[in-house]
Amino acid sequence: MFDRRHLLVASAALPLLAVRAHAAPRAFTPAAFQAAQAAGRPILVEVSAPWCPTCRAQKPILSDLTASERFRGFVVLTVDFDSQKDVLRQLRVQMQSTLIVFRGTEEKGRSTGDTNRASIETLLAKAI
């Protein structure tokens, strides 16, 4: 049972939870992609490989940007370059470190090999 002290502690923690509540990346599945498209959500598709140094450089930039208020509403879907070849064909992707943004069903932009925070931010902004 909650008393007043528990309520105060819980309400003080809510802003901290809101800061953490951002677009956590999840594995690309056709169902997740279609659901985000149907909802008209901004979508970031991140094509990466664990051995890719460019992909590793992109990850903290993407994490930081999608945690920001401006991009918090994004659905972030990750595609494994080595194992999801069917998705690569579907999205017409030829290289790892490819970022694609959609607004609903419409592709708004893409880049490959970009590790510049400002240009990645500009790419994400195309989908909002």
Image (cartoon, grey):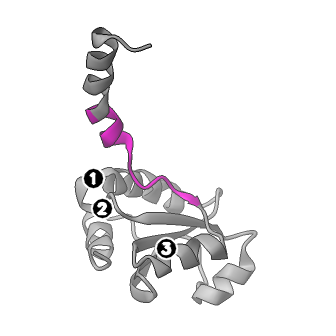
Q: Is residue 65 left or right of residue 90?
A: left
Asked if residue 81 is positioned above or below residue 19 in the image, the reply reads below
Asked if residue 21 is positioned above or below residue 84 in the image, the reply reads above
Measured from the top left, where is residue 36 in percent x and y?
A: 49, 73
Residue located 59% across and 70% down the image: 32
Residue located 30% across and 32% down the image: 14
Q: Amino acid at mark 3?
A: Ala
Q: Which residue is mark 3?
A: 36
Q: Amino acid at mark 1?
A: Ser
Q: Is residue 105 left or right of residue 103?
A: right
What separation in Å lies between label 2 and label 3 (alpha carbons)? 15 Å
Which quadrant, please, contains the N terminus?
top left
SS for dot 2: helix
SS for dot 3: helix
Q: Nearer the viewer, mark 3 or mark 1?
A: 3
What separation in Å lies between label 1 and label 2 (alpha carbons)? 6 Å
Q: Which residue is mark 1?
A: 68
Asked if residue 17 is positioned above or below residue 80 in the image, the reply reads above
Q: Are marks 2 and 3 in contact (CB under 8 Å)?
A: no
Q: Is residue 21 left or right of residue 122?
A: right
Measured from the top left, where is residue 110 in percent x and y?
A: 42, 82
What separation in Å lies between label 3 and label 1 (alpha carbons)? 19 Å
Q: Nearer the viewer, mark 2 or mark 3?
A: 3
Measured from the top left, where is residue 22 in percent x and y?
A: 38, 51
Which quadrant, please, contains the C terminus?
bottom left
Q: Which residues are magenta?
A: 15-26
Q: Which mark is residue 71?
A: 2
Residue 22 shown in magenta: yes
Q: Are marks 1 and 2 in contact (CB under 8 Å)?
A: yes
